[in-house]
């Protein structure tokens, strides 16, 4: 998995090479597209090689940023 971290407040994924990619869209629990970060359970992220990755937010632990 190239995505190693996510920043939900910025709508971005951090890839394993250190680059970031903006979420192209987010989905809620019903699979409907949403712009509401609180309702989103996953996001689609474009990868540099032209592929796409679906990122399940539950696979990432929350971390406080100071």
Image (cartoon, grey):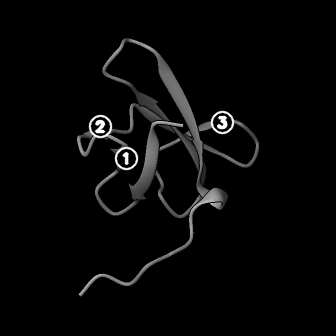
Q: Which residue is mark 2?
A: 21
In space, the residues marked 2 and 3 are separated at their CA atoms by 21 Å
Mark 1 lies on a secondary structure that is: strand
Q: Residues within 10 Å of mark 2 (few under 14, many from 20)?
A: some
In space, the residues marked 3 and 1 are separated at their CA atoms by 20 Å
Picture coordinates of residue 9 (x, y %)?
A: 33, 63
Mark 3 lies on a secondary structure that is: loop
Mark 2 lies on a secondary structure that is: strand
Counting the numbered discs, the total is: 3
Q: Nearer the viewer, mark 3 or mark 1?
A: 1
Q: In the current view of this chain or complex, which residue is farthest to the top?
A: 50
Residue 32's label in the rendered image is 3
Q: In the current view of this chain or complex, which residue is farthest to the front?
A: 17
Picture coordinates of residue 19 (x, y %)?
A: 23, 41
Most foreground residue, 33 or 16: 16
Tell whether label 2 touches label 1 (CB within 8 Å). yes
């Amino acid at each position: 998995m190239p995505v190693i971290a996510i920043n939900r407040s910025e709508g971005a994924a951090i890839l394993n090479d250190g680059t970031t990619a903006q979420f192209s869209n987010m989905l809620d629990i019903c699979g409907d597209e949403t712009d509401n970060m609180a309702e989103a359970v996953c996001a689609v992220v474009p990868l540099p090689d032209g592929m796409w990755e679906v990122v399940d937010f539950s696979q990432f632990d929350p971390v406080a940023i100071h």
